[in-house]
């Protein structure tokens, strides 16, 4: 047994090792018979990657760099993705990309060259989209957002994107004040 003065013992855990392990998996969810989650990637500039574990046990990153599945709604963030299992067509994921805070739809099994498609407009710093939290084959994905209107404060809203998420923007009238938002005095 080694003995040393208090605080002077050598440790295999240093600051570099601690920083290299930025957190734990976040926002796990089932998509059909697969498990999906957000994985921190400190070696990639702090990017958050969407990862899936298939039924056979293999793991793969759903979106390559530079896609960063994260949001900053109300400055705290929230669930940044949702997905639907579409038997025969593969999964459809809707996610928030951190640098521009837009919602995108992506079909990871669509084949080579498949790219995420934007669902929300791109005015800089206009909205921070919270995670699309509900999925329905009838109504598509639903999400929360905090919209900034210069110079006013953020306004919580509920927004939807069309199913099957093939347009570049949500249809007119899909963003509305959220019935459970603090702005309406009914939420927390």
Image (spheres, rainbow, N blue to C red):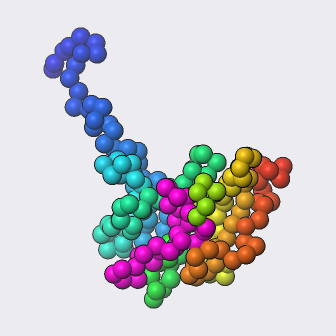
**At 80% from the left edge and 50% from the top edge, which residue is drawn?**
183
**At 67% from the left edge and 82% from the top edge, which residue is drawn?**
138
**Residue at the left extreme of this rendering:** 1
Q: Quadrant of residue 164?
A: bottom right
Q: Nearer the viewer, residue 40 or 59?
A: 40
Taking the image as drawn, is residue 35 in sight?
A: yes
The mark tally for this picture is: 0
Q: Quadrant of residue 15?
A: top left
Where residue 154 appears, x then y in whole percent? 71, 49
Where residue 103 appears, x then y in whole percent? 56, 66
Where residue 155 appears, x then y in whole percent? 74, 53
**At 41% from the left edge and 45% from the top edge, which residue is drawn?**
23
Q: Nearer the viewer, residue 28 or 174?
A: 174
102 drawn magenta: yes
Range of residues picked out in magenta: 94-121
Where residue 135 appears, x then y in whole percent? 61, 72
The relative height of residue 150 versus residue 103 in the rendered view (above or below) is above
Q: Is residue 184 left or right of residue 153?
A: right
Q: Nearer the viewer, residue 126 or 177?
A: 126
Q: Nearer the viewer, residue 41 or 36?
A: 41
The relative height of residue 108 versus residue 122 in the rendered view (above or below) is below
Tell me the quadrant of the picture where the N terminus can be found. Answer: top left
The relative height of residue 114 versus residue 4 in the rendered view (above or below) is below
**At 35% from the left edge and 65% from the top edge, which residue is drawn?**
64
**Residue at the right extreme of this rendering:** 185
Q: Is residue 125 left or right of residue 109?
A: right
Q: Main secondary structure of the magenta part?
A: loop
**Residue at the top extreme of this rendering:** 5
Taking the image as drawn, is residue 81 in sight?
A: no
39 drawn magenta: no
């Amino acid at each position: 047994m080694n003995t040393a003065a208090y605080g002077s013992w050598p440790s295999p855990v240093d600051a570099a090792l601690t920083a290299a392990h930025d957190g734990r998996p976040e926002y796990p969810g089932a998509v059909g018979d697969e498990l999906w989650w957000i994985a921190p990637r400190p070696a990639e500039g702090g990017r958050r990657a969407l990862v899936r574990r298939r039924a056979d046990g293999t793991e793969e990153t759903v979106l390559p760099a530079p896609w960063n599945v994260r949001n900053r709604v109300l400055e705290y963030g929230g669930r940044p993705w949702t997905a639907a299992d579409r038997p025969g067509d593969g999964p459809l994921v809707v996610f928030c990309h951190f640098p521009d805070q837009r919602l995108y739809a992506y079909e990871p099994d669509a084949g080579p060259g498949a790219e995420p498609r934007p669902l929300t407009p791109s005015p800089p710093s206009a909205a921070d989209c919270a995670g699309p939290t509900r999925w329905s084959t009838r109504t598509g994905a639903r999400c929360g957002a905090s919209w900034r209107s210069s110079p006013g404060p953020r306004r919580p809203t509920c927004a939807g994107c069309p199913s099957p998420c093939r347009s570049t923007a949500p249809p007119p009238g899909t963003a509305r004040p959220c019935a459970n938002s603090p702005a309406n005095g009914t939420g927390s």
